[in-house]
């Protein structure tokens, strides 16, 4: 199949990480895949496992506030910028005539991208044959108003054949955070979590000193994803070490590429000799597997990395600007016995130190195993839908 995947990340890189995993699985299955990225570039060419990647003129946000979209140079989006980006997107899809189109998040989010996504959906609906069109969403959605839910329903019904929900339905379903899910006529397929066992954090330079990697006792790992909104957590961790009963251990502070250089150097300058501050590392999975406790926010990929490494966690979910997604996910992990949660408004050095001590005593031996083969399951479902379309143009079933 010729498959196009559209993804727009605005803050962290989690959306792109998930779609890369899906693109890799589809390409490995023998399909011709193009990943269309709309955010500030984050990928490395060597990470493109058998699929093509097209970069649109980049769009981002500033400081976690999703109300204003910006160009890569921090200028607001102009009408001409939107026109040129939309034209590039439509020309690509028209020229390659995909048999499958996957759009990440929209219409459950990314409404600000309607200027290009609605024309794209209108165009593919007129193609002959019409491409199968899927919406891909993560496990937990941001809470919205009743009017937004109704509009989302209408747009799913109008444009999409199925919704891929990248969650283990035993833990989280679409209905948990989208109350009108039962009204969808499009198929809803819960694939399991979309996580690559071989996925590792990209190294972004900095000091990759390994001298303390094998030091006993096991270290504390502190991370904040891409780092755009993680400075408060990293800064609090530095202070928490001074009052922690685990201060004798090595603490490794991993700083994402989106944290400004000035804040990175501020962290390094305030670190004591037993704290290693460095940019994200390629061996992140191995560091988690060997740590005593992982401290992080509660983004999709970070939480799954911790689950895959079977490490104890302290989760400080990002909750500014009305965000609810990470709080919901952190609560799920706490209920399963995998994590201790510190709400962002309550984050202080003593609170964090106490949470680390509680997390170190979690017993993970009774935690259920999560379904994390979402890339393979999604690939099989898409192939089944395509096969059904070839036999008869009727809605696909999981």
Image (cartoon, rainbow, N blue to C red):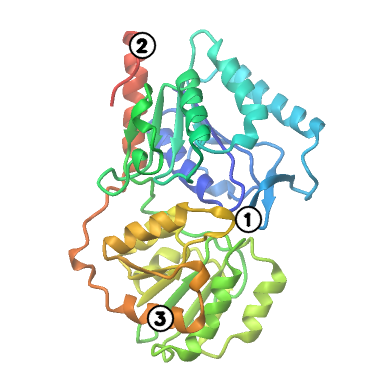
Q: Residue furthest front?
A: 146
Of labels 1 and 3, earlier in sequence is 1
Residue 262 percent location from the top left of the image: 72, 73
Label number found at residue 234: none
Residue 348 percent location from the top left of the image: 51, 79
Of labels 3 and 2, earlier in sequence is 3
The residue nearer to you, when weighing 20 against 172, is 172
Direction from residue 205 to residue 103 in the image, left or right: left
Q: Is residue 116 above or below residue 259?
A: above
Residue 257 shows in this picture: yes
Residue 54 shows in this picture: no
Residue occupying the point 38% across, 25% down: 184
Residue 233 percent location from the top left of the image: 54, 72
Rate crowding at label 2 as few (under 14), some (14 to 19) or many (20 or more) other CA atoms within 10 Å. Answer: few
Direction from residue 199 to residue 312 in the image, left or right: left
Q: Is residue 81 above or below residue 344?
A: above
Q: Are marks 2 and 1 in contact (CB under 8 Å)?
A: no
Distance from label 3 to label 2 (Cα)? 54 Å
SS for callout 3:
loop
Residue 147 percent location from the top left of the image: 52, 32
Direction from residue 203 to residue 116 in the image, left or right: right
Residue occupying the point 59% across, 55% down: 321
Distance from label 1 to label 3 (Cα)? 30 Å
Label number found at residue 219: 3
Distance from label 2 to label 1 (Cα)? 44 Å
Residue that mark 2 sits on: 390
Residue occupying the point 79% across, 49% down: 73
The residue nearer to you, when weighing 335 against 375, is 335
SS for callout 2:
helix
Residue that mark 1 sits on: 64
SS for callout 1:
loop
């Amino acid at each position: 199949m010729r498959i196009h995947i559209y993804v727009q990340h605005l803050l962290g890189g989690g959306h792109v990480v998930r779609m890369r995993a899906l693109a890799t699985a589809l390409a490995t299955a023998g399909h011709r895949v193009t990943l269309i990225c709309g955010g500030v570039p984050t990928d490395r060419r060597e990470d493109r496992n058998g699929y093509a990647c097209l970069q649109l003129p980049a769009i981002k946000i500033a400081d976690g506030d999703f109300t204003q979209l910006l160009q890569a140079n921090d200028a607001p989006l102009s009408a001409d910028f939107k026109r040129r980006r939309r034209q590039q997107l439509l020309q690509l899809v028209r020229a390659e005539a995909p048999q499958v189109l996957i759009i990440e998040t929209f219409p459950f989010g990314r409404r600000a991208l309607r200027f290009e996504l609605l024309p794209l959906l209108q165009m593919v609906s007129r193609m002959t044959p019409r491409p199968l069109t899927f919406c891909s969403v993560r496990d937990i959605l941001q809470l919205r108003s009743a009017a937004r839910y109704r509009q989302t329903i209408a747009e799913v019904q109008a444009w999409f054949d199925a919704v891929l929900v990248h969650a283990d339905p035993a833990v989280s379903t679409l209905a948990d955070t989208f109350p009108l899910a039962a009204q969808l006529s499009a198929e809803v397929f819960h694939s399991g979590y979309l996580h690559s066992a071989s996925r590792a954090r990209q190294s972004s330079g900095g000091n990759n000193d390994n001298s303390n990697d094998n030091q006993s006792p096991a270290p504390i790992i502190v991370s904040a994803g891409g780092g755009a909104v993680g400075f408060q957590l990293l800064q609090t961790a530095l202070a928490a070490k001074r009052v922690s009963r685990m201060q004798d251990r090595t603490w490794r502070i991993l700083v994402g590429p989106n944290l400004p250089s000035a804040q990175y150097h501020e962290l390094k300058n305030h670190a004591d000799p037993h704290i290693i501050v460095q940019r994200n590392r390629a061996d992140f999975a191995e560091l988690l597997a060997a740590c005593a406790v992982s401290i992080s926010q509660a983004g999709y990929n970070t939480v799954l990395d911790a689950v895959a490494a079977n490490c104890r966690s302290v989760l400080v979910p990002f909750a500014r600007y009305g965000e609810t997604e990470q709080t919901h996910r952190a609560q799920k992990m706490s209920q399963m016995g995998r994590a201790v949660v510190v709400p962002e408004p309550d984050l202080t050095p003593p609170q964090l130190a106490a949470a680390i001590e509680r997390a170190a005593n979690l017993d993970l031996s009774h935690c259920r195993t999560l379904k994390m083969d979402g890339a393979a399951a999604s690939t099989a479902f898409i192939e089944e839908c395509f096969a059904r379309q070839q036999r008869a143009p009727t809605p696909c079933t999981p």
